Amino acid sequence: MKNNKAHIFLLVTLFLFTFSLRFIHLGADPPKTLSISMGYMSDPGGYVHNARNKILFGTWETDKWNMMYVSPLAHYITYAIFLIFGPGIAQVNIVPALFSCLILLFTYFVLKVEFDRKIACLGVLLLGTNYIFTMFSQVAVRILPMVFFVLLSLFFLSKKNLNKKTCYFLAGVMCFISFTVKGTFLQILPSVALGILLYSFFQNQQKLKPAIHALFLFGLGLTAIMLLWLFLIYFPHKETFLPFGSSNYFWLTPHRYSELIQNFWHRPLFYFINMPILTTLASLYLLSFFYRAFSFPKKISIVTWICGLWIIFNIPYFSVIYYRPARHFIPLI
């Protein structure tokens, strides 16, 4: 009983401390050295453009810049906050601050299932005090709402008291909601899909059919929301989305093999160099993951499969692309 009371006290203190960091000086500008890209300074204004229009002018659209279709969920949350508190920089930053708190909360839930309460508290402390994550908790660039819904999919997948078929379907739903918040989710999708496939494969005596069925259920949940999004948002407002695809391809993709090799060879993953503790822990985690994957893969949890693959896929990805703003590293953090 005393241990439970001590743990509850520690947990409440930990969350109060980490949550409070997200609401100090909400209206302040982010540090000018936070990222090599200045998008974190300018993008928030573009994202809240339609919500501000509605409050100030009584109409959503005043021109052809309509990010409410590109990131609808965060847009309506922002609009609700504007209705209550009025428009302003601090009000804009309430959205990432709230989602940052939710990420910390569900990080605790997932780590508690995967490990134990002590590791879960340590994970929350490390994430909650990470400089880049904390700074972007007050920058409305939509990366934190995206990460939250990915984390929510991991939460459902980690639940042992829920039917696995239901978990796979709900994970697919959450993943596509994540995509509708920010398309950067696509860098995470292969890890989630392959993680589900490998977990189901090894849990079912290395039979391919149950693994494909699990992946089908995940895809079914993803497709169900995708169809709604296509017919309600994408097709009616297709012209809003098209410029983003071409510009992202131009900014991200090396156009020759020599450029790809040059990017990989000359540019270190500097954000991880600046985070030695997390980098060391991630490296040890990867070594453990490789050992377990080759020695006893059946004992690896579905969350471990996804997170291990997440790191393995994304580190090479960030090593070769051109555009690497700090905010795109947050899912890896």
Image: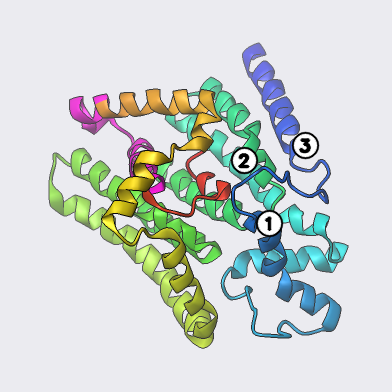
Q: Which residue is mark 2?
A: 133
Mark with earlier residue (2, 3):
3
- Contact between labelled residues 1 and 3, with CB atoms less than 8 Å apart: no
For the residue pair 27 and 127, the one nearer the viewer reads as 27
Q: Residue at x 57, y 24 (%)?
A: 122
Eye-nearest disc, 2 or 3 = 2
- Residue 286 image position (x, y, % from top left): 35, 29
- Label 3 crowd (10 A; few <14 / some 14-19 / many >=20): few
Say if the magenta span includes residue 200: no
Q: Which residue is mark 1?
A: 140
Query: Which amino acid lies under the numbered mark 2 shown in the image of this protein?
Result: Phe
Q: Secondary structure at mark 3?
A: helix
For the residue pair 275 and 299, the one nearer the viewer reads as 275
Say if the magenta span includes residue 303: yes
> Can residue 115 be spotted in the picture?
no
Q: CA distance from mark 1 to mark 2?
A: 12 Å
Q: Which residue is mark 3?
A: 20
Q: CA distance from mark 2 to mark 3?
A: 14 Å
- Residue 53 image position (x, y, % from top left): 78, 78
Mark with earlier residue (3, 1):
3
Mark with earlier residue (1, 2):
2
Magenta residue span: 291-319
**Seen in the image, is 213 located left or right of residue 111?**
left
- Contact between labelled residues 2 and 1, with CB atoms less than 8 Å apart: no
